[in-house]
Image (cartoon, rainbow, N blue to C red):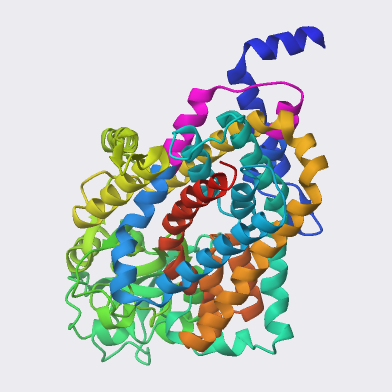
Amino acid sequence: MNAIREFLEAQPVIVVLLVLALGAGIGRIRILGFQLGSVTGVLFIALVFGHFGFTGDQLLQTLGFALFMYVVGFEAGPRVFTVLRQDGLKYVLLSLLIAAAGFITALFLGKVISLPPGAVAGALAGGMTTTPTLAAAQDAVQGGQATIPEGLSADEIVANITAGYAITYLVGLVGLILIIKLLPRALSMDLAAAASEISEESGKSPGAAKPNVGMRAFRLSEDSIFVGKTLREGEKLVPDDATLVRLRRNGEFLDPQDRNRVIESDDCVTIVGLLPRLQAMGDDIGVELADPEMLDVQAESALIVLLRKDAANKSINELGIATDYGCLPTRVRRSGIDLEPGPDLKLRYGDVLSVTAPEPFLVRLGHRLGHLERDIAETDLFVLLLGAALGVAIGAISITVGGVPLSLGLSGGVLLTGILFGFLRSVRPAFGRVPSGARWFIMEMGLLLFMAGVGLAAGESIIQTLREAGAPLLLVGTAITVVPVIVGVLAGRLLFRMNLALLFGGITGAMTSTAAMRIVCDEAKSTAPALGYTGAYALANIILALAGFLIIRFELMGFA
């Protein structure tokens, strides 16, 4: 064992990789239907390794943190301004009120209850279940934006921040889920009825199964539902998840993009759609064909980014995506959340629409909506890394105001360039491409590297913090979780008059908790609350990162 320990102590990179692997494995375990997740798992394992004296690689931690914050800003960039323009101020104000409620609760209880310096900032991050708050608070200490009280070191305060976060995070996560689940019942709020009022904005939770898209060919009988109809009219007779892509008459293929062409008896048509629906409606169309020519359709799946202002705020039906362009929408992704592409779903600027159709159809729709993604697997590493490096440089710039040095710090600088580059990407689609899969990996790996680093650094003091302030921290963390939710509900109902389903979705977005959002969707028996989540989430990460920067400065002023 001593030999293994000596080997690991000499190889900090291996320690970090072990922490990531074991943490991700623990995060998969379900207890009473509840899954910790990889972030919590990595933090727990890192604290254990750190308690036994193992350390990580500081460079890996900083690099992971920089990439994580950059992509957070990059994802928010296209939506920050559209949230202000399209969704009004209600989600902005809701996010601000919830963040302010948590901030004030943390500061007040920090004054009333004696906690180690830095623990209040950690409790705010844990109680609000938000990593950007934790990252910004630690960065403010390490970057010199917060004044270190005499007799203390930056490492000690960072350890207290992390310990406070680790102790309160699980309380915040479970507590938020419970209050979101129980509060509507206690107040006799019918989330299901509220969700049914938003039929035109039905959404779909993340993680839904990939649509089983296929194609079928038919020879139309005399009594077929299509005979005598134009291709555009025929589209309205098939389910919303199907589209006509090929038409043959007397052995000659006709242009299916001419949506005004009249369909005749004995024509052959090819339909792309969800296979179960196509099979169920076959008798109403005609005789199914096993015809290689008709089935030789190079249907492709592609992503189209909605960037044309004259197409924004219109429903899928109003845009004629199926009837006029012959394209089958399979998913709409908005602020990292998948929405079901129902016919009445209104598309927003910056939405990413997944569609299936032959290549010419996709090109036409791409011209109508904005930008057709071609090489969707390719990441523009030059812009990605340049943006992160530029953010680090901006964060290092310090300006003295009234004798006080001020700077954005690494977190603020990288978040700022991420927002700017993300916005530029929405304006110039060929700029800085980072596909959704790559963004997920960079954010997840960056966050896990960061959490591994902070856990290893704080592991040595976690037991002592638990002994000295464990119970008070749990109390503070619980209050920080509960108070903002109550403030959000009161403000949403009394001030903003928000739909209940959207309100509770917005509250979970303002607290950046996807797990709690899924609970709201379950309680509402609908995925419409995901729309409220996306409205608040776009700004919440930015607001909560700022809260982390401010709270550590206010907290340490009390110890100066």
Residue positioned 75% across, 13% down in the render: 5
Residue positioned 16% across, 76% down in the render: 258
The quarter of the picture where the N terminus appears is top right
Q: Main secondary structure of the magenta part?
A: helix
Rendered location of residue 293, percent (x, y): 30, 61
Q: Is residue 7 magenta?
A: no
Q: Is residue 526 above or below residue 357?
A: below
Residue positioned 36% across, 43% down in the render: 408
Q: Is residue 238 above or below residue 34?
A: below
Q: Is residue 300 visible?
A: no
Left or right: residue 510 versus residue 482 is left
The image quarter containing residue 480 is: bottom right
Left or right: residue 556 versus residue 400 is right
Residue positioned 65% across, 54% down in the render: 110
Left or right: residue 437 versus residue 384 is right
Rendered location of residue 374, percent (x, y): 26, 49
Please report the bounds of the magenta region as a residue range.
46-68
Task: Return the residue nearer the eye: 343 or 286.
Answer: 343
Rendered location of residue 133, percent (x, y): 52, 50
The quarter of the picture where the C terminus appears is top right
Q: Is residue 492 visible?
A: yes
Q: Is residue 50 magenta?
A: yes
Rendered location of residue 416, percent (x, y): 32, 47
Task: Return the residue nearer the eye: 4 or 180.
Answer: 180
Numbered label tally: 0
The image quarter containing residue 377 is: top left
